[in-house]
Image (spheres, helix red, strand yellow):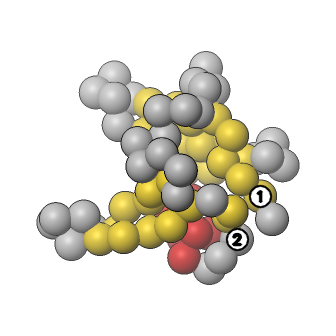
Amino acid sequence: MEKLIALHRNHTGSIISFETSDGRIISYLKAIQEAECGLLEGVQTMEDPNGKPSLFSVLNPSFDDLPQIY
């Protein structure tokens, strides 16, 4: 099972993509879809206060422990 190992944030600090342990670069939305299907280890999805699905790390909800891709 793949893990998220790095991320890319836009100019406002929002996460826009991740690198997986298999070397794939996937969008934030694709990561949500894969987490919902049980394809990513160590993450879960939850609805944010606006009702949109959001991705959370089981260990660190803000993903601050992941290095930047670029």
Q: Quadrant of residue 9?
A: top left
Image position of 44 with respect to 38: above or below: above
Q: Is residue 19 above or below residue 11?
A: below
Outermost residue toward the bottom?
Answer: 37
Q: Secondary structure at mark 1?
A: strand
In space, the residues marked 1 and 2 are separated at their CA atoms by: 7 Å
Question: How many labels, in total?
Answer: 2
- Neighbor class of circle 1 (other Cα within 10 Å; few <14, some 14-19, many 20+) is some
Tell me which residue sits at (60%, 43%) in the image: 18
18 or 4: nearer the viewer:
4
Residue with the mark numbered 1: 2
- Image quarter where the C terminus lies is top right
Nearer to me, 60 or 47: 60
Q: Give the percent coordinates (x, y) of residue 59.
A: 53, 50
Instruction: Identify which residue is drawn at 65% across, 76% down.
Output: 38
- Residue appearing at x 36%, y 70% in the figure: 46
**Residue 12 in view here:** yes
Q: Quadrant of the N terminus?
A: bottom right
Q: Residue at x 44, y 59 (%)?
A: 55
Residue 54 left/right relative to 2: left
Q: Quadrant of residue 25?
A: top right
Report x, y in % for residue 33.
54, 70
Kind of residue indicated by mark 1: Glu
- Specify whether residue 29 is in view: no
- Indicate which disc residue 52 carries: none
| Marks 1 and 2, the one that precedes in the sequence | 1
How crowded pointer 2 is (Cα within 10 Å; few <14, some 14-19, many 20+) is rated as: some
**Up/down of 20 relative to 31, above or below:** above
User: Disc 2 marks which amino acid?
Assistant: Leu
Which element is circle 2 on?
loop
Mark 1 in CB contact with mark 2 (< 8 angstroms)? yes
The label shown at residue 39 is: 2
